[in-house]
């Protein structure tokens, strides 16, 4: 883990530069748009609003009694918003080193600045939307104390996205096909998670497959906190910690192995 610890230490010392890069990343997303940040928030807001309109209002679809909520649209909003935040951070972070190749070749900057910038910018966009769900859903369970877990879940999800994005960014620098493969996996990964359906609807013998998705833990955590007002169970936190440890180990190994070749790959 030495390589990763060293990289994180550099990022901490350059946190001022990281903050500037993150602000520029956010500004670039809505540059030239009169609505500014509204246009960044509008697509995910319209997407989740359409879930509520179609599934809860128009069709009035309902889930079984073992689900965290009976309303399908209400259930989908929590998981899909978290998944969109994760996918956005991973995709942007994965491409960040390729986009910053010229800058890294001319300046001795830590490569981790760029995946970290992408992850922080995505968190700045989606974290307010996830926190907004506390106000929207809290009345259902009278603002159960479990909603206090939401900020912690957002932080852990952002860290998870950063580690995965940085690992994939190094792999994409070595082999450009990684970007295409990951794009497909992110499209399919939402079906191998409790985003679209409760865990109880997945066959018991195959539920272990859901835990191969790094977002299963955070999604279950959000559902417990936002839909039921309950503190996420221990299994959720253990799954998140396990994924963080695994990704940290893999990223540290990738950093150590690619240190001398990364700039040449870019």
Image (cartoon, grey):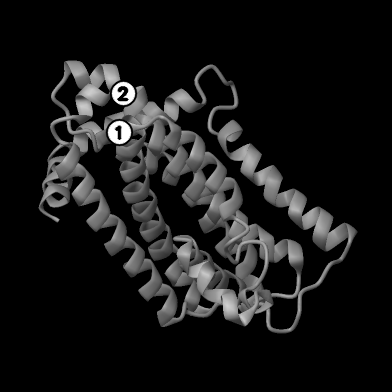
Residue holding disc 2: 100
Looking at the image, residue 67 sits to the left or right of residue 145; the answer is right
Which residue: 54% across, 47% down? 186
Which residue: 44% across, 32% down? 177
* Nearest the eye: 104 or 158: 104
Give x and y (percent) for residue 17. Answer: 21, 31
2 or 1: tag closer to the N-terminus: 2
Residue that sits furthest to the bottom in the current view = 65
Residue that sits furthest to the right in the current view = 58
Which residue: 39% across, 71% down? 239
Looking at the image, residue 208 sits to the left or right of residue 112; the answer is right
Give x and y (percent) for residue 161. Answer: 39, 50
- Is residue 260 at least partly visible in the picture? yes
Looking at the image, residue 198 sits to the left or right of residue 71; the answer is left
As drawn, 175 above or below 126: above
Task: Confirm or deny contact between disc 2 and disc 1 (CB under 8 A).
Answer: yes
How many numbered markers are drawn?
2
Give x and y (percent) for residue 183. Answer: 53, 40
Q: Residues within 10 Å of mark 2 (few under 14, many from 20)?
A: some
Give x and y (percent) for residue 153. Answer: 42, 63
As drawn, 254 above or below 205: above
Residue holding disc 1: 114
As drawn, 214 above or below 221: above
* Nearest the eye: 59 or 98: 98
Which image quarter holds the N terminus?
bottom left
* Nearest the eye: 63 or 77: 63
Which residue: 34% across, 47% down? 162
- Is residue 143 at least partly visible in the picture? no
State the CA–CA distance, disc 2 to disc 1.
Answer: 7 Å
> Mark 2 falls on what kind of element?
loop
Q: Which mark is residue 47?
A: none
> Mark 1 falls on what kind of element?
helix
């Amino acid at each position: 883990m030495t390589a990763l610890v060293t990289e994180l230490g550099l990022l901490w010392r350059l946190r001022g530069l990281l903050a500037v890069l993150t602000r520029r990343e956010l500004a670039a997303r809505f540059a030239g748009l009169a609505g500014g940040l509204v246009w960044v928030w509008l697509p995910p807001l319209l997407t989740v609003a359409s879930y509520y309109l179609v599934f809860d209002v128009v069709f009035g679809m309902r889930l079984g009694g073992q689900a965290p909520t009976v309303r399908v649209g209400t259930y989908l909003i929590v998981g899909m918003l978290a998944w969109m935040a994760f996918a956005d951070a991973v995709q942007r972070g994965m491409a960040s080193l390729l986009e910053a190749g010229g800058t890294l070749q001319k300046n001795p900057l830590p490569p981790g600045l760029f995946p970290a910038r992408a992850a922080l910018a995505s968190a700045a966009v989606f974290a307010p939307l996830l926190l907004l769900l506390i106000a929207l859903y809290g009345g259902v369970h009278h603002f159960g104390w479990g909603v206090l877990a939401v900020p912690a879940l957002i932080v852990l999800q952002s860290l998870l996205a950063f580690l995965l994005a940085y690992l994939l960014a190094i792999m994409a620098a070595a082999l450009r096909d990684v970007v295409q493969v990951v794009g497909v996996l992110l499209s399919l990964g939402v079906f191998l998670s409790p985003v679209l359906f409760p865990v109880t609807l997945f066959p018991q013998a195959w539920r272990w497959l859901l835990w191969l998705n790094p977002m299963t833990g955070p999604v279950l955590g959000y559902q417990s906190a936002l839909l039921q007002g309950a503190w996420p169970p221990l299994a959720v936190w253990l799954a998140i910690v396990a994924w963080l440890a695994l990704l940290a180990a893999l990223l540290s190994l990738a950093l150590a192995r690619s240190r001398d070749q990364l700039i040449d790959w870019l």
